[in-house]
Amino acid sequence: MLLLSFMLLRPCLPPFIFLLFIFDLSAQSDLHYRFEPNPQNPFGKRDPATPMASGDFDPLIGEQACLSLTRIDRDNWADTTTMLWRWKYIMNGNAVQDETLLPNGRNAGSIRQYIADSANWYVHFYSSTLPSTALPAWEGNLTDTGDIVLYRPQTAPNGMEGFYKIVFSEIDPWGFDWLGAWVTPDEKIVYQTWKIWCDKIPYVGFQRMEITRKSAQFNKSGDKTIPVSLWYPSTVDHEDQKEERTRYHDYAVELSSPENDQEIPEMFFRMVNSYDSIPGPTKAEKFLKKAAFSVPDANPRDGKYPLVLIGGGRPLNHLELAEVLAHRGYVAASFPRLGIKEGERLSFTEEGASEYMEDLAFVLEELKELPNVDPERVYLLCWSYEGAPALAYASTASGIKGFFSLDASLGYEYGPGLVEKSLNPKKIKFNFPVFHFTSETMDHGKDLSFLGDLKTAGNQIEIQRNWDLSHAGFTSIGSVTAKRIKEQEEDKVYMDLIAEILGQLNRLEAKEHPR
């Protein structure tokens, strides 16, 4: 109405004033509707102000390549067909819309809203083949098993009362299963009618770059070359994604750079086995042939994105986490822990911490220059040793918006000693929040007193001790890669941790543009 009234007055106003008004409306749209799908986030984002349960479908957001199987009659099923299932946030991040696109043109979709008063999802279904004046609706929620279960009353052809039950299961950032069945109220009779299996389409690019800084101690040439791995939002064509996706073997080559390619399977087996005991080199070698989630050297999506720099051992330790971050609109970067001298391990000493801080500072400044990185939206995420030196660096760096510690050295007895000269809790004030994720078990030298001192000094420190994971379990290689090699499900606690990190990142991003 305001714009209409203004349009009527337009002939009375100088052209430049009208243009300024339209520009202001555009700027307000960017501000008020920032969770809507846009070129930078084509599937939108959930509004952080909504209840946490509104993110139940968050792992599904994006595009899924699916196989669909429907029942013909009591004894027969139709041929399996392919299907594209697209999910996005709508209503400025307050609801979810999904569309199923089939080759035969029989398309359908749903609007999904979570209503906090009843703690339930309400799913309104529509179809191109069965248009309706009143949309049928399913009702349900996320269960303790991690499945999303929905019901709608439906009478069977023989007059028996019951429900049509929908179950989303095996949900993780890489896909899900779906089952539709008619059930009696007590569910003693279950008649399955439709099955769907989905794999997430990547839209993630992967590339490796080398950053060289001067280091007189590293080698005779005085150059220290740091291999940096990058995962980023991309414009991958889903029709070719299966052929182009990076194989785990290629990741092992890129992220470890052994001299002999034949050493890869044995090296990979030893590495994974140090985090979780796996059956043997044969299974590891078989796993290396499988496709991961990203596409090498894919074209980056237009726009500037927040940067999450991941530290902790090697990039291979946090592969799946990096892929998920990139899929959700972040540039993820990681580089290996390199020694002071070439070929040597980095010492867990003040000297070693100082070396890592120099590497981190140099790498980060180079990454800030990348065309798809916003230099003022940087987050650090560290596991194990790297936590303390990374926080010491962040305390004086610019553009840092948040720090995530995955059971890192900040929460161990040895950690503060690495950086006591540069990170005095009585003097340091961070202008960003610090999140420390750990378990209830306080053994192996865990000590939260340093974090407590930082919090007492007025810093934003949040300690979460409810994560039932071993130290190795706070890595993707321990909770995802090793499990997949053993043909087991990913650790659900770790998957919940990824969801928690994404939630915190989205909340911090929202603070950059408050309502």
Image (cartoon, grey):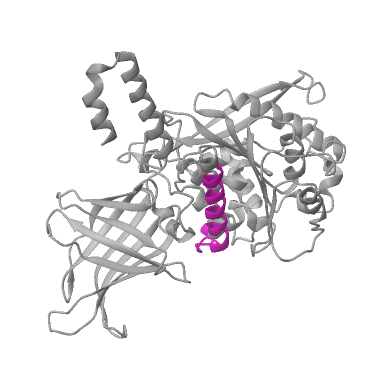
At a point 28% along the width and 65% down the height, the residue shown is 195
Q: Which quadrant of the view contains residue 393?
A: top right
Q: Which residues are magenta?
A: 484-508
Compared to residue 60, the image places residue 428 above or below, namely above
Is residue 272 left or right of 79 when viewed as pictured?
right
Residue 418 in picture, x, y percent from top left: 84, 42
Is residue 318 left or right of 102 when viewed as pictured?
right
Residue 201 in picture, x, y percent from top left: 37, 45
Q: Toward the viewer: 499 or 449?
A: 449
Q: Toward the viewer: 279 or 168?
A: 168
Dominant secondary structure of the residues highlighted in magenta in the image: helix
Q: Quadrant of the N terminus?
A: top left
At a point 50% along the width and 44% down the height, the residue shown is 323
Quick check: is 486 in the magenta stretch?
Answer: yes
Quick check: is 103 in the magenta stretch?
Answer: no
Q: Is residue 261 visible?
A: no
Q: Which quadrant of the view contains residue 394?
A: top right
At a point 21% along the width and 26% down the height, the residue shown is 8
Residue 158 in picture, x, y percent from top left: 12, 84
Q: Which quadrant of the view contains residue 259?
A: top right
Q: How many marks can you see?
A: 0
Compared to residue 67, the image places residue 302 above or below, namely above
Q: Toward the viewer: 67 or 365?
A: 365
